[in-house]
Image (tube, rainbow, N blue to C red):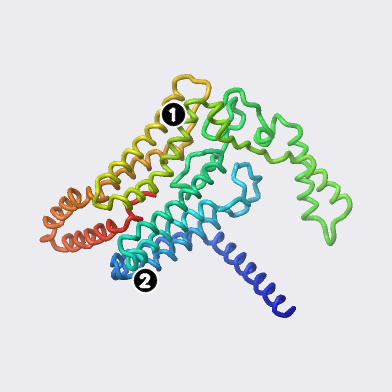
Amino acid sequence: MGLVKGLKVWTWFRCLETMEVYKTWVRRNKEYVHSLESLANGLTWLLPERFSTSEIGPEAVTTVLGIITAINEHIIDTAPTNRRQTSSVDPSSFPYSLCLSALKDLETLVEVVAEQYYGDKKWNFIAITEAAKVLVRLALFQNSGFKMLLHGGETPNVEEHTDCSSSQHRVGGFQKHGGHNGPGWLQNNHSNSPWNLEGRALSALSRFGEHARMGSDTPWMRKIQQQHAIMEPPAPKLERPTLSNILSEKGLNGALFVTGEILFIMRPLIYVLFIRKYGIRSWTPWFLSLAVDFIGMGFLLRAKQAGKDGKEQLLHLSAAENDELRRRKLLWALYLMREPFFSKYTRQKLESTESQLEPIPLIGTLAAKIMELIIGAQTRYTYMSGS
């Protein structure tokens, strides 16, 4: 019994050691890894019977590659650095972005398997996966201090604060005037801080002793290292606002921002539930989903515009968050590819264009292949969901 237990422990440690070796390799060769992943994901579109309703294999391959890509991205993003951590993201926190990426990749495979074995009842399984994504995104939204979700939460919303000496500081997505300068301000103003001058001097002595020593540490070296640890300023801690704080302190701007983000998070689930009830050919889910998108975006833009009127509480959006708003607007183009709009309007235009290009050598063949991929992708909810 003890031998079996010892073997399990040894196997577990070997797995951990192998994982650490793999992490090190990925972080050292991230450009090569990105290139290899892009090539592999591109080739999956050329797999035979990629969009066949009876072929699960190609989608399984695509799902596995997608999950591996998500894991590698998570390994690269969580690489330890020598710089002090000043972001609001706890390295030991739950990997929300990895979880969402894995759910998104698995959802396509779930759809294909459910369609093959259960037919129209596949919407029950899709609704379950969408509900799981909603729960994870809501948890991420709360845990991040109610920051805007980037790419549906797959990209961490970590803003780099380069100008820490400003008279404003940001809490969540909002700015306050007259904020005090915390410990992070001391780190970026060496010329005005004798504390940091002394700390840097001790650090230089410590590095000199590190290179000069032969053998074990000497007592004076340990003393210098202890003094350096004491003099080094602590890493700043950013307070995460709660929902009650935002609603009470930010007023209408905060309520509009939170409501707009929640509508964005809930929209795919609402869409699937109404498809499940009315069917994919009904206009009701299509119009309702579009209305939820419009209302949510309207709330976010209204909160953003309200910050330009000289109010006390300003809604400050970073460059990444402004890009996210533009990305969400571009996603509205997917409504042209969703039923019933696609069957009634978009498909006719595409087929007309294909027929015009068909007589042209090479271009006609390429147009036919593109048309095949578009129609095949359109049959998958997960490719056109924008979630």
- Name the mark on residue 303: 1
Vertical order, 119 against 294 (above or below): below
Q: Quadrant of the N terminus?
A: bottom right
Where residue 372 appears, as percent x and y from the top left, is 23, 61
Taking the view exactly as shown, the residue that stands out farthest to the top is 310
Along the line of sight, the residue nearer the viewer: 219 or 339: 339
Along the line of sight, the residue nearer the viewer: 248 or 39: 248
Secondary element type, mark 2: helix
In which quarter of the view is residue 189 placed?
top right
Amino acid found under the numbered disc labelled 2: Gly
Q: Are marks 2 and 1 in contact (CB under 8 Å)?
A: no
Q: Which residue is mark 2?
A: 57
Residue drawn at x 21%, y 61% as measured from the top left: 366
Secondary element type, mark 1: helix
Residue 329 falls left or right of residue 29: left
Residue drawn at x 53%, y 51% as measured from the top left: 96
